[in-house]
Amino acid sequence: MDAKNTIVTPWPKQGLSEHVRAAPAPVEPRPSRDEAEAAVRTLIAYAGDDPSREGLIETPKRVIGAYEEIYQGYRECPVEVLDRTFSETGGYDDFVLVKDITFNSHCEHHMMPFYGKAHVAYMPVERVVGLSKLARLVDVYARRLQTQEHLTSQVATAIDEILKPRGVAVMIEAEHMCMSLRGVEKPGALTLTTHFAGAFREDANEQVRFMTMLRGGQR
């Protein structure tokens, strides 16, 4: 499905949820880079260290540079990731599953990392999307401040609204550092979330088949 096929025109943007149709609007006025670096220095001092210490002098600049990468999802639009599809499917009518999509995100409650794997399936109607685009879509939403539940729902909704397939299934399993490194301190605990739409929601057998294929079996 990533092979050279006939490219269908992009999907129209009408009738899409706000988070699917466009990247989030930036905060106005957006703090300057100098202000952001000053905030990092304040946090370093609050933690108990000296931001003017040799090893920390360049840290604010590095942290803000890292933020540009970690939170680049705020500058990306989901519909632009999935807007090109391919029509040469040879009559394929089963679901497409991409599993073990690794991702990194940050909890919006503590701004601590959570990371894991996303498993995404959809039932195409006449046309398919490049497989790498599904992984990119996960990253668009993951590289924002998130909850795992919201991330799962957003990925599924974007696929459902843009591609308009017969069904969508998304499962995410992740470890949360806000639970592993602080609070109850339970490293290794995994959180699983799912979202089903269309045929996957209506037919329990399709859900079973999805879960069976995730675990390496056949049904």
Image (cartoon, rainbow, N blue to C red):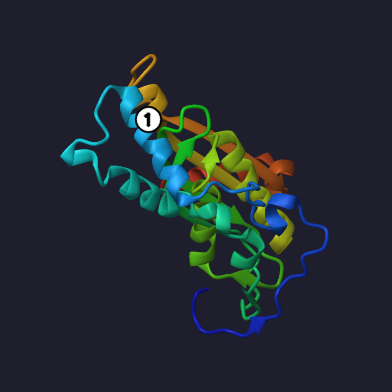
Q: Secondary structure at mark 1?
A: helix
Q: Is residue 22 left or right of residue 44?
A: right
**Looking at this view, is 94 or 146 the one in front?**
146
- Please name whichever residue, 60 or 78, is drawn nearer the observer in this view of the structure: 60
Q: Is residue 132 left or right of residue 53?
A: right
Q: Is residue 70 visible?
A: yes
At 46% from the left edge and 27% from the top edge, which residue is drawn? 110
Residue 85 occupies quadrant: bottom right
Residue placed farthest to the left in the image? 54
Residue 27 image offset from top left, x and y in percent:
63, 46
In the image: residue 41, left or right of residue 214? left
Residue shown at 32% from the left, 30% from the top: 44
Q: From this view, report whether residue 60 is shown above or below residue 72.
A: above
- Residue positioned most to the top: 184
Badge 1 density bin: few <14, some 14–19, many ≥20, Cα 10 Å = some
On the image, the x and y values in percent for residue 159 come to 65, 56
* Residue sitting at x 65%, y 48%: 28
| Residue 134 at x, y percent in the picture | 54, 60
Which residue in the rendered view is the most extreme toward the right? 15
Q: Quadrant of residue 203?
A: top right
Give x and y (percent) for residue 50: 24, 29
Q: Can residue 101 be seen?
A: no
Kind of residue sitting beneath label 1: Leu
Can you say whether 17 is above or below 194 in the image? below
Residue at the disc numbered 1: 43
